[in-house]
Amino acid sequence: MNKREWFGLLCKQEEGLLNEEEARLLNRALAASAGLQEEQERIRKLRALLRQQPVALPADGFAEQVEARIFSRGQQWLWQAAAAAAIVFVMAGLSIYYSSGSLAAEAWLGTSGLQPEDAVTLLETSWNPFK
């Protein structure tokens, strides 16, 4: 095992999360390695120091301030998205109108230049999911 894996086992031991096989492996390694014992002691000291630190509680009204900020940004984003969608829709309509000259069905479908005999070719070359 590499150093990172041993460190992970030591941390799991401190949390009480080792299974029996991992515990046996770690205990054998601790008995054989002074360096691993030092690392275990460092982890224990660090955990003890962290437990001594005061628990920071959020200020009164903190959750309400966060929610208000999130909701105000959410509404702002919604208006921006709606404006962008409207602009895209108008630009698409204008490009169709000016490229074909009108908003007729032929302009939307792209069928203005087709002849009656082209219908058979279109039907034969169309994608058919039932073939």
Image (spheres, helix red, strand yellow):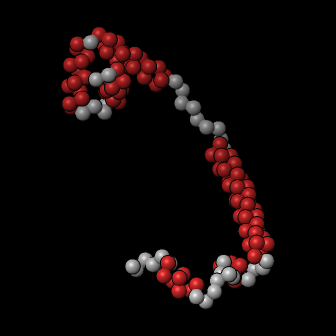
**Residue at the extreme bottom:** 116
- Residue 80: x, y in percent? 74, 58
Identify the residue at horizontal 48%, vertical 23% (top origin).
Answer: 50
Closest to the observer: 76 or 71?
76
Residue 2, quarter of the rendered image = top left
Closest to the observer: 130 or 83?
130
Identify the residue at horizontal 50%, vertical 78% (top origin).
Answer: 126
**Residue at the extreme top:** 34
- Residue 114: x, y in percent? 64, 83
**Split into 4 quadrants, where in the image is the C terminus?**
bottom left
52 is higher (above) or lower (below) than 99: above
User: Count the marks: how many?
Assistant: 0
Identify the residue at horizontal 68%, vertical 55% (top origin).
Answer: 74
**Split into 4 quadrants, where in the image is the N terminus?**
top left
- Residue 105: x, y in percent? 69, 83
Residue 15, quarter of the rendered image = top left
36 is higher (above) or lower (below) than 65: above
50 is higher (above) or lower (below) than 101: above
Q: Does the rendering let one see residue 10? A: no
- Residue 65: x, y in percent? 68, 46
Identify the residue at horizontal 65%, vertical 42% (top origin).
Answer: 62
